[in-house]
Image: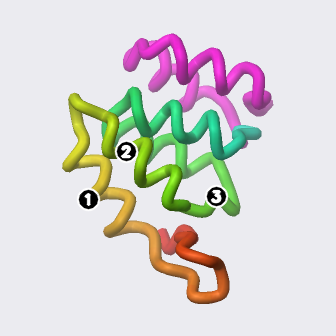
Amino acid sequence: MGISAVDAEAIAKRADKDLTLHILRRNGNIDITEEVFMEFVRTYDRQILEHLLLRIRGMRITNAILDAAITNDWRRDEILEFLLANWSLDDTMDSAYTVCI
C-alpha cells in the first residue's frame, strides 16, 4: 500500500511529526510532487526527510527546494546540510540535484 499525492500533501501540512513518522513507516512508496516535497522541507526535520526519501524515487533537488529549506526556521541548517550532503549536482540538469543515497 502506498501514499497518494493528495494524502502526502495533507500529511505535510499537518506538521505532526509523530503521526508522520508512523504513517511513513507503515506505508510503501509515496507519490509526491515537488511542491509537496517542498512543504515537507519547510516543515519537518532531517529524520522525517530520511524516512520520506526511502519511499520516493527520482526526486530532484532544485533551487526551489533549497529555497524552501531556507524558510525552515526550526531546522534550516540541518536540512540544508542533509540535502547537500546526500544529493549530488546533476550537470545535465540546470542547477538540479539528484539523489545519491
The N terminus sits in image quarter:
top right
Label 2: which residue? Answer: 69
At horizontal 49% and vertical 79% (from top left) the residue drawn is 89
Report helix, strand or loop for mark 3: loop
Sequence-wise first label, 1 or 3: 3
In which image quadrant can residue 34 be found? Answer: top right
Q: Is residue 68 left or right of residue 28?
A: left
- Which labelled disc corresponds to residue 81? 1
Q: Which residues are magenta?
A: 1-29
Q: Where is residue 16 shown, x and y percent of the image?
A: 42, 13
**Dominant secondary structure (helix, strand or loop) of the stretch shown in magenta:** helix
Please rate how many residues cluster around mark 3, counting C-alpha atoms within 10 Å: few if below 14, some from 14 to 19, many from 20: some
At horizontal 24% and vertical 42% (from top left) the residue drawn is 76
Q: Nearer the viewer, mark 3 or mark 2?
A: 2
Please rate how many residues cluster around mark 1, counting C-alpha atoms within 10 Å: few if below 14, some from 14 to 19, many from 20: few
Q: How is the image coloured?
A: rainbow
